[in-house]
Amino acid sequence: MNPHVREPDEGAAESPGEATTSPLPPAPAEPAVLTARPTVKTVAALAGVSTTTVSRVLNYKADLLSDATKARVFEAARELNYKPNSMAIALRKKVSQTIGLMIPDISNPYFHQIARGAEDTAMKHGYTVIFCNTDRSASKELTYVDLLDEKRVDGVILTGGGVDGDTHLADRLHEQARVVAIGPHRLSYPSIGADDRGAIQAAVLHLVAGGRRRIACLGGQPGWLIHQERLAGYRAGLEESGITYDESLVMPSDLSIDGGQQAVESALRAGLSFDAIMSFSDYAALGAMRALKEAGLTIPDQVAIMGCDDSPLSQMVEPALSSITFPVWEFGSLATQMIVDMLNGRPVPASQVLPYQLRIRQSTAALRVLPS
Amino acid sequence: MNPHVREPDEGAAESPGEATTSPLPPAPAEPAVLTARPTVKTVAALAGVSTTTVSRVLNYKADLLSDATKARVFEAARELNYKPNSMAIALRKKVSQTIGLMIPDISNPYFHQIARGAEDTAMKHGYTVIFCNTDRSASKELTYVDLLDEKRVDGVILTGGGVDGDTHLADRLHEQARVVAIGPHRLSYPSIGADDRGAIQAAVLHLVAGGRRRIACLGGQPGWLIHQERLAGYRAGLEESGITYDESLVMPSDLSIDGGQQAVESALRAGLSFDAIMSFSDYAALGAMRALKEAGLTIPDQVAIMGCDDSPLSQMVEPALSSITFPVWEFGSLATQMIVDMLNGRPVPASQVLPYQLRIRQSTAALRVLPS
DNA sequence: CAAACGAACGCAATCGATTGTTCACTGCCG
DNA sequence: CGGCAGTGAACAATCGATTGCGTTCGTTTG
């Protein structure tokens, strides 16, 4: 155990910078010049043609327009720095070129990689994405569903997994928007994800191969589908190894750092013993590591620990945390691609499963001496 | 030094899950029922009034409407599940209720906290935010500026700091949208940020107080304004301590984990010696820690290290990394608030400076025996 | 009793773009 | 010289909401 005294982490403030606010500005609200924006009409006038022609030229629907006219229109548009009003277009075309992304919390690396994947891909296709941080709160979710509805989004990506008996609020959007889910859910949308069950099963087998027999499970909430899926993998791994499943070794948590720490602390306090922990998230695993260290247990000698989702953190801690990595950016990217495809009338697979990989690091090093 | 053998981190894949794609779906593109959405007209018809009245009722601009009429309209709207079309409104009102957020990369905790602050606050005021991950690429930035322009955003928040001789692309939006910057910049927008200079200065003084005299600087690129600001703080801290500034101790980097590691590795290879590192980012500091450990140097005994921006990582590594914390969520939140205020014609301060705090942890513990 | 007034609501133009239909030419053929 | 095909471009309706102005009442006032 580390002999360093643990300093109180918070409150160790030193010479806090002061908050200041400069006096109110000389020139406040109105922008310097409020030039009226050019519209098709303006461009048409400058080019000496009708708005119809401007529209056709700028949208390349102009097989039968003379080259001279095209040139004049382009020139006029350039000169006026004309940018079409996307809202007028959306109104007329009844398509907003917008996709909503429901996400529990962008702070989580897992989710912001999804977000990046979605954003990058949406951008590539000319779509904008609206991020909705639900914080797993039903009321926020409801607010966002209304928002997305009013914004007339063309599609919605659901993440964060469903729960038991889920009738997702986004169902209300289904009549209007295309919906794709990332991860396990009980709904009738096309979905994309990984083989969570198989991944956890493989990880458990890895722990067993390292000589571990009493493998605890640091899971999420029983109602979460993702938890159920992974728990099934955990049980399958045990079974395959001839180890009987012991429900008391399953510790529920919210899968956060603090949650993981608390769960393990109370398990230890309850006298539970184990030689490995299979965590369903890296964050929870990190919290668990903290709890183990404070209890004087060494990792991986006394307790091996395996995370899941492979956050950047896992490579930085000591010992480095073994984990399972999923192609998360691709989840977001492919989900977006599917929505775009659906919007273009192309058929899409009902479900896609992407490969996972175990990342074996020091936290699950094999026992030197196998127990009898 | 840690005796563990460093395992190759990548490539240790075990039983990779297979990628599968289920057969194309039975029911593909079109949504089940494509019910026409209700509009003001529909509601008006059902309530037996004109669209004018519907609009007035639903917008509470109805001092002189009878209660009976109001009730009928509300009832009709509810029954039809009417949601106003935000694009029609935006078109008519010439206000999109949308704010753009230019951000280098949402993956960075610093920036996604800004994003959360902006999002939460925007949402509160009925605004939507469009995230723009520029990856510090000028071409992406240009693309996004065009996008924001076409979307007719009401405001834009600039983050990531400017560079020397900056004429930011967003200038092109200034005539149309209100612009607020977070962090140092050379432009004429209102801004919000922290006293970076003072923060680094205080941190250097803390290192000196711990007995350090040869304090290296792990900085960013010389052209970044944020780097210049912080470098000034570094120099001020040295000067105040009577230590002469040594340019060879300043290591430029891209402030990423790998960048920090490489910078320190090459500094050590060049024979540079120091007893402390003042890093301008936590990520770079973590990379530096890695380099130091691999070189067999102990932290904090042989080299103290101080980070900046206080990412969640810093509390998890060993030894825990001292850092400087800024109210980043508030940056995003306040920037949004300022834009909303400007849009409502309220005056806003030209600049706001929020307080920082030093977080002292183990990586900068004082030397037990002060050097002579 | 007529003019005046206010309460309650409707008409129709408007925001900026798209698009089905129509129109004006030009040239060519018979 | 009339008619017809083929170009090239304009007209005007439309998307869904907001809003200035006007209208229709019933009631009050001089």
Image (cartoon, coloured by chain):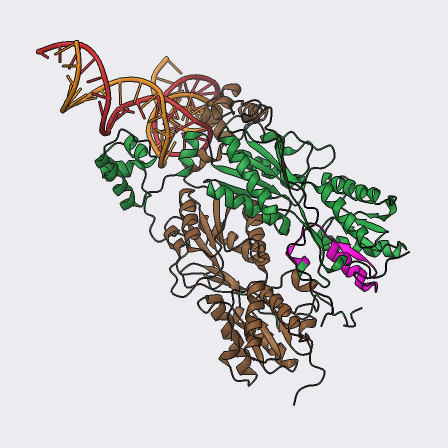
Chain colours: A brown, B green, C red, D orange
Left or right of A78 on screen, residue B291: right
Q: Nearer the viewer, residue A194 or B222?
A: B222
User: Residue A358 is drawn in which quadrant?
Assistant: bottom right
Residue at figure coordinates x 79%, y 61% from the top left: B299
Where is residue B48? Give x, y as percent: 21, 35
Seen in the image, is B207 located left or right of residue A84?
A: right
Judge whether A122 appears above or below D17 on screen: below
Q: Can residue A43 be seen in this view?
A: yes
Residues in magenta? B285-314
Decide whether residue B4 is among the magenta residues: no
**Residue B222 visible to an observer of this rendering:** no
- Is the C terminus of chain B in the top left, top right, bottom left or bottom right quadrant? bottom right
Camera-nearest residue between A68 and B256: B256
Q: In this view, does A188 lie above or below C18?
A: below
Q: In x, y percent, where is residue B229? A: 74, 39
Question: Image height check: is B72 above or below A263?
Answer: above
Where residue D27 sits: x, y (%)? 14, 22
- In this image, B199 relative to B86: left or right? right
**Residue B31 image offset from top left, x and y in percent:** 38, 52
Quadrant showing the N terminus of chain B: bottom right
Which residue is the extreme one toward the bottom? A372
Give the total of numbered labels.
0
Residue B291 within the segment the image draws in magenta: yes
Q: In this view, does B359 lie to the left or right of B73?
A: right
